[in-house]
């Protein structure tokens, strides 16, 4: 199924700027032979809206397929735990809320530190197994979609709330207006919506085409997000850039249209204007440039593979994108230290994912670092390796 109207402004002038053909789900790591046999591939064109400049994926895959085996529990990842502890403290210092609602609350990784600070926190999430984990910790969690009906239930139980927040969940939603209407219904007139979203400015500057995949759906910058927020009666009052997930934004929006805006909002909007982030031409240029990059990596590694052994390192979504876009069936194994991924197979190419000790036992001639944004750390961890490392971005590099 494909949507025909822009997720931000409703316009039907959506233009494709990159098309990688059919691709597997980037996060669909395969656990066994049956999963390999059943695996499907889906078209992955990426569009930009001619009217508001929003970058988005219009090809829709049902949430049941995307999050069927949702094995991602936030509280098992240390940097994320720290992020949410800091975020809870930031919320308290900035807004001093009494009650907070979080949509996409996962296993309660934010609800927990909020509760510790004495803030009443209620979470909403669609995943049954993950919300069960949150409930077992004594947290107040509703299983379902954060829509107006759920918002009304919360309002009746807890009264109107001070803050509605979502970390990363917002861009994954095909109908962001449902969340915005729900937030409006449950917030006090002086309440705030706080969104943490992957930032398109970092995506452009760091050429992160390999994060443009089905699960992510929408890629916002402040300019395009503001268009959407305004339509549903939210007024942007502050913004911060965050280092997580390759670059993110924390956007603070008020229900009160008279609330004062920080200078940082204007500064970032100005920065985005200079980058021409919401100009569709920027994205057509990006698409052409990335097409050439992929072709160079594909040709170079294919030639190498005829005389040498190549492994990959870092089995994240980015890896799925590179090895499938470049058809790297010759990669013998993909190294990853996470027990959630090692022992499984890569989507599409079915490359086995192995723990780092396997690499030491049988080192190849080359290692292609698919998690190229962590190249330095990976090289340091495997400093014993005497072969050649390869990174694809920002330039194809051998070292
Ligand atoms: Zn639009």
Image (spheres, rainbow, N blue to C red):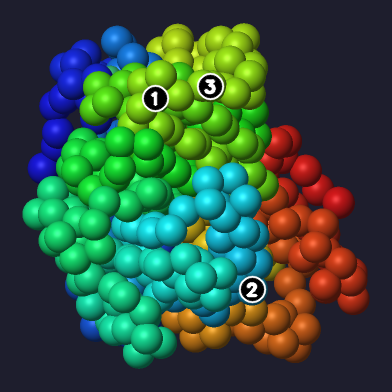
- Regarding mark 2 in the picture, which secondary structure is present there? helix
Of the numbered discs 2 and 3, the one sitting upstream in the chain is: 2
- Of 137 and 9, nearer the camera is 137
Horizontally, residue 210 falls left or right of residue 101, namely right
- Regarding mark 1 in the picture, which secondary structure is present there? strand
Q: Residue 261 has which mark?
A: 3
The residue located at (90%, 76%) in the rendering is 384
Residue 289 x %, y %: 55, 23
Residue at disc 3, CB closer than 8 Å to ligand 1? no
Q: Residue 78 has which mark?
A: 2
Question: Residue 129's image quarter?
Answer: bottom left
The residue located at (61%, 36%) in the rendering is 240
The residue located at (40%, 32%) in the rendering is 254
Residue 20 x %, y %: 37, 38
Q: CA distance from mark 1 to mark 2?
A: 33 Å
Residue 323 x %, y %: 50, 55
User: Mark 2 against mark 3, which lies toward the viewer?
Assistant: 3
Q: CA distance from mark 2 to mark 3?
A: 33 Å
- Regarding mark 3 in the picture, which secondary structure is present there? loop
- Residue 193 visible, this angle: yes
- Of 185 and 202, nearer the camera is 185
Q: Residue 235 has which mark?
A: 1
Residue 56 x %, y %: 33, 32
- Quadrant in which ligand 1 is drawn: top left
- Relative to 302, residue 262 above or below: above
- Relative to 257, residue 208 above or below: below
Q: Please count the marks in the image.
A: 3
Of the numbered discs 1 and 2, the one sitting upstream in the chain is: 2
Whether tag 3 and tag 1 are in contact, CB under 8 A, the answer is: yes
- Of 166 and 375, nearer the camera is 166
- Of 1 and 165, nearer the camera is 165
């Amino acid at each position: 199924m494909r949507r025909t109207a822009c997720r931000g402004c409703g316009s039907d002038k959506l233009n494709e700027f990159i098309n990688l053909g059919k691709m597997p789900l980037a996060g669909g790591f395969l656990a066994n032979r049956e999963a390999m046999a059943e695996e499907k591939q889906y078209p992955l064109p990426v569009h930009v809206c001619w009217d508001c400049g929003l970058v988005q994926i219009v090809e829709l895959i049902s949430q049941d397929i995307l999050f069927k085996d949702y094995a991602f529990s936030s509280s098992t990842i240390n940097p994320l735990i720290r992020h949410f502890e800091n975020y809870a403290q930031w919320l308290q210092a900035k807004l001093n809320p009494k009650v907070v609602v979080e949509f996409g609350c996962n296993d309660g990784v934010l609800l927990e530190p909020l509760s510790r600070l004495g803030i009443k926190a209620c979470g909403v999430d669609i995943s049954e197994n993950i919300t069960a984990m949150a409930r077992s910790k004594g947290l107040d969690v509703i299983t379902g979609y954060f829509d107006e009906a759920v918002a009304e239930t919360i309002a009746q139980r807890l009264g109107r709330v001070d803050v509605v927040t979502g970390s990363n969940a917002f861009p994954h939603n095909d109908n962001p207006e449902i969340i915005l209407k729900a937030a409006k219904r449950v917030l006090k007139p002086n309440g705030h919506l706080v969104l943490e979203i992957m930032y398109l400015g970092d995506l452009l500057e760091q050429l992160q085409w390999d994060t443009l995949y089905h699960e992510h759906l929408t890629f916002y910058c402040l300019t395009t997000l503001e268009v959407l927020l305004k339509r549903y009666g939210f007024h942007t009052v502050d913004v911060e850039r965050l280092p997580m997930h390759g670059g993110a934004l924390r956007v603070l929006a008020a229900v009160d249209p008279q609330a004062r805006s920080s200078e940082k909002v204007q500064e970032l909007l100005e920065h985005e204007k200079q980058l021409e982030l919401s100009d569709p031409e920027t994205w057509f240029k990006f698409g052409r440039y990335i097409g050439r990059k992929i072709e160079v990596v594909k040709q170079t590694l294919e030639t190498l593979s005829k005389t040498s052994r190549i492994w990959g390192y870092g089995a994240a979504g980015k890896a799925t994108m590179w090895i499938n876009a470049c058809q790297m069936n010759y990669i013998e194994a993909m190294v990853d230290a996470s027990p959630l991924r090692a022992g499984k197979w890569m989507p599409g190419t079915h490359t086995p994912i192995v723990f780092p000790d396997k690499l030491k036992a049988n080192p190849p001639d080359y290692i292609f670092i698919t998690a190229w944004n962590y190249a330095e750390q990976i090289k340091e961890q495997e400093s014993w390796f005497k072969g050649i490392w390869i990174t694809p971005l920002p330039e194809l590099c051998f070292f």
